[in-house]
Amino acid sequence: MKKIVSLLLSLAMVLSMCSFASADSLAGTYDIKVWVANEIVDLTKKQIENFNATNDLGIVFNATIEAQGEGDAATAMVTDVDAGGDIYCFAQDQFARLIQAGALAKLGQGAAKTVQEGCDADAVKAVTTSDGTMWAYPLTADNGYFMYYDKTVIPEEDIDSLEKIIADCEAAGKNINFEMQTSAWYLASFFFGTGCVSVWKTDEAGKFTSVTDTFNSDKGLIAVKGMKKLLDSPVHVSSSEIAGFANNAAVVVSGTWASADAKNMLGDNLGVADLPSFEVDGQEYHLGSFFGFKLMGVKPQSDPVKAAALHRLAQYLTGTQCSLERHAERGWGPADLAAKADESVANDPILKAVYEQKNYGVVQDAIHGSWWDTAKVIGDGVKAAATEDDLKAVLQKYEDDIAALFTLDTSALLFVGAWNGWNNADTADTYYLKDGALTLDVPESDYMGGRIVAPGSWDTDKGFAQVTTGAELIKDLGAENPDNNIVFAEAGNYTLTWDGTAITIVRN
Amino acid sequence: MKQYSDLEFLRLSRGQKFLYRLLRFLIAIPVGIGRFFAKIWQGIIAGAKALGREIKDIAGTFAHGDWKTRTSFLVMGFGNLARGQILRGLLFLLFEIVFIGYMALTGGYWLSMLPSLGLEGPSETYNEILDTYTTAYHDNSFKILLYGVLTIFFIIAFIYTWRQNVKQNRIAERILASGKKLKSGKEDLRSVVDDQFHKTLLALPLTGILIFTVLPIVFMVLVAFTNYDGAHDGYANNLFTWVGLKNFNTMLSWSSGGGSQSYAATFGEILTWTLIWAFFATFTNYFLGMFVAMAINKKGIRLKKLWRTVLVLTIAIPQFISLLYVSKMFAKDGILNGFLLSMGWIQQALPFWEDPTWARITVIVINIWIGIPYLMLITTGILMNIPADLYESSRIDGANAWQQYTKITLPYMLFVTGPYLLTSFTSNMNNFNVIYLLTGGAPTNPAASSAAGSVGYTDLLITWLFKITTGAESQYYLASVVGILVFVVVALISLVVYNLLPSIKNEEDFR
Amino acid sequence: MSENTAKRHMGLRASRALSNTLIHVLLVVMSVVWLIPFVCILLQSFRVESTWQVGYVIPQKWGFDNYVNLWNTDFPRWYMNTLITALVTAVLQTVIVLCMSYTLSRFRFKMRQPLMRFMLILGMFPGMLSMIILYRVLKDLGLTQANAVPGLILVYVASSGMGYYVSKGFFDTIPMSLDEAARVDGATRSQVLYKIILPLAKPIVIYTILTAFMGPWGDFVFARYISFGASAGKNVAVGLYDWLSKDQINKSYTLFCAGGVLVALPVTLLFLFLQKYYVEGVTGGAVKG
């Protein structure tokens, strides 16, 4: 009897799976929330209606579309993932943060393949973590900055030189708007211009593991010298608002999103170009820039059917047709290769400037969320600096801050105990685990015990109970060891290794 | 230190008087703090004694009570019902049923999860047929903490009600023994609008305060002992859990993790500016507002009502409109700079928001613009209360306007508005709107900026706290620590000043 | 009158005239400074030649376009949300505050002192973090996002008991002997409140209604939290504030000004109309003379 029941059950399961597998199993009406930038709310509404009308799977979305700027999407999502948009757009810099917050669902294999084949190679990289998992759909490939300028103030032949532009503006009493003091995104321009890099590595969970950062170097010093020229000019305004043109600016460094407003403000006098070069010690450096993507993500769902349907919609919205519509209506540069190759996109002068500047740009990769705050203060530091030593100090401070992002993490752990007098603020770094390992002499004493802690804390989660190898070298005190200490049986020279979950002890 | 009598004090020279007062003030600070802790200790002892009395009383009630009373220990309200107080009895019984039902259905779960704040985080599965990933959500640390605390509130309320229930039996027994009659339901109802009227009036407001003010504050304090942040939101990614005093260690430790400034140093810098700001924001407004009030009140000034109305407009118009606009006016490419440049009065745009010192002065000045109208209103009324004959007689004695001000007006004002000055000082410390709308904390303070978000020169502790929660890592636990520290600072200041102010020693003025 | 005193009087009169003139000048200057931002906002709201921020104040082309365009946005919805919130809050909050302040002013009961001290201490906690918790509580009640209005009302009203100081100060000035006389005549406590105290407390009642009504118009932090991304649940402050965000400001700056004028209008009119009571409330209650 039992067997029959289980047979029937498994049969039912197989059947239900079959019905899942057929395409029309996705058919149904879904209430969803979609978050997109204000300017494409209406367009997206139309596009979703189109999807409802044309998809052959019987999917109908009953979508509430809300305006949510791509720059703040992560801040909003992290506040309450549960109530956030089922589909939402965000700028690339928030990628890691959103994965960590559990606000992005992985792409299935089919979807991943479509993105892989249909999108700009850099864009594909932008949505993939180091283990090859894809987490989002590339929406645009135009998230970079370049120069809008007033042709009546700056003659065509001067636009390649920062010094000439500054001179022209000073002569005309016009401002140069380049957001140097409040944005790391713009500020990095000078560093990338001299060949500095800041490359961050993450593990598969989106956690940052290391950084290669060369801002504090000879090249970096050249960059800040160039930056100082601009910052010291009385006509410099730290802003990227295109409305600067209505407030006495002749140059605004901004991105494609401002193109419609820029045209409105300057009309025929509007010029668009890649960023200029600056000169330090007789050598020219073309300003670099960040180049990034806007992405569309799907929030993790509990219901697999709804999840599958949402991924279909995201694919549609980032597909060729929708990308072209967004370009036609709003001038957004598509990440979709077919759309990018379309004549209307290829001949767009503004996108031309974007791609021209991209040659000098750095494609934005995952960057630690704190980097933006850490790096943006360079601007104020450089402005306040009086001497070259001051400039060096600014860069040194930056490097220390970057390093601190990691030392605050697990890499700097302290083996605190009888051997250092239970000093958990030890600064001599004799008892730090470097790359997770430490070799030390345990001196003879009544209680040769201690545990691994983060500096300044008294955690009890890395001690006796975590020892997997070498348990015979330490005492098991049972209930007399409430703090989970590792108590050595004998004095001697030991090597400790901590791999994040377990401790290995070897006697040397 | 020697204490002078009034006579001796009057003989001192002006400098000596000042020094004496200052010393008295400084001595009062530790004394005040000491007194505070002594009071707390006394409170604890008194509480312990009271608890002992209660337990004795309960035991006594049980030992001497009849069967009705004893049954009430288990079935609340039984005694009331048995003795004919139907309304009271039913209410007690109903409360017990609700309580037991709640504890059995959900309360027990929340309470049992409270020590761990959840055991199972979300899990991801891959559905091969649909080629899609799904996430199943399990425990929710946030809800566990929230409802756990609420359940504890509820248990306390239950214990209190149970105690009342026991007490009423004892009282009823005594009344019946003395041959009197118990209160009927009708009389109970009448007392609700008469001799127990204060309880009726307070019931609703206090319930609201309990759930919407006390509960959040308790929760906030508890968050400081957890690792609740953007990456441990307790539901969608990782559960959060208790971490003990770790966050306080981080915030109060002077050793920095690497090159950046330690949290303690950053906190110190922001606190210093917060105090400077609160001082200037309070006193500039106070004196200028008083001055304007006096100017308008002066004999011979026409259109008094018009001037007042114009100034008062700033109160009526929501700050987010006026301050946002003013903030843009003062921008480097704003209207004000544009005007000054075009008039040729300045050669370069003034760095109102770019330079730390400029920015700090500008926010204080703009705050005057907001604050004067309030102060003008408040002081106008008080100035009119000063007896006119005081001025009259001083004028006959040949006092000039300045002397009248320093000898009559100011002392009177300070005496009357002492408590107001204190509250306005502490509320200026927490003046989120003005700073957030005007500068957002800018310009950035490179040295103080650390992993907890960018800190600016005009940031107050309260805006810093806000930035921490909305920063890249959403470190709610750190924000919570800052919140607790803000409380400690405000409480200390209030404590000291309360002990010094003459005009609020009187209970009736205690506000 | 001797010649000397006559001279002195003339001198006094002259100096008083001089100082009065100076004060008049000062008041005129102050009024101008105080009004400039509002006049600017008003002027900008009539500018139709462009929608972004400009460096001049007087529009080149005037018109009502911005006000007309407001109808094509969610602004009317936000306005209604705020108006409803403000009206309901004004009524309920006044009831709560009066209950609280009247009780604490008139009754002497055992827990009175501890209660007041407890609330004083509660008030020293920065409320900023409470938002996160209140948001979750309201979310569980289904009162967030598009349903934010009842949620906001609930929170505003529920926590308003804390703000009893001003009206308590006012009640303290009404002599206790009135109550006692009525009690002797056989009135219950509640009758004393309705028949004797409330009629006398008209200024403070109006003051409380007015402040409660004004509050919701300016809340842009908490209201944003509660509406969480749903346009239908925003109030005017959140909606208008969002129009100044980076990606919208150039399209919506003049709209912001027009919306601002419409927000300021009812509050200002009401305020001017009831100014007398506001002043009485502030001076009578905020600082006890």
Image (tube, rainbow, N blue to C red):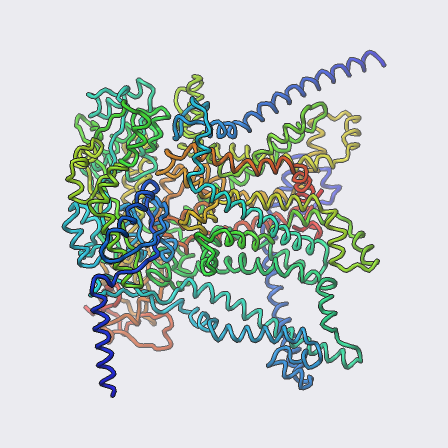
Residue B450 position (above or below residue B36): above
Question: B475 or B395, which lies in front?
Answer: B475
Determine if residue A211 is in view: no
The percent coordinates of residue A402 (x first, y second) are: 28, 47
Q: Residue furthest top?
A: C3
The percent coordinates of residue A265 (x first, y second) are: 33, 26
The percent coordinates of residue A379 (x first, y second) are: 32, 35
Question: C35 or C153, which lies in front?
Answer: C153
Placement of the N terminus of chain A among the 4 image quadrants? bottom left
Q: Along the horizontal axis of the image, is B275 left or right of B348?
A: right
Determine if residue C76 is in view: yes
Q: Residue furthest bottom?
A: A1
Question: B342 or B248, which lies in front?
Answer: B342
Q: Along the horizontal axis of the image, is C54 left or right of A301?
A: right
Placement of the C terminus of chain A among the 4 image quadrants? bottom left
Residue A67 position (above or below residue B363): below
The percent coordinates of residue A484 (x first, y second) are: 34, 70
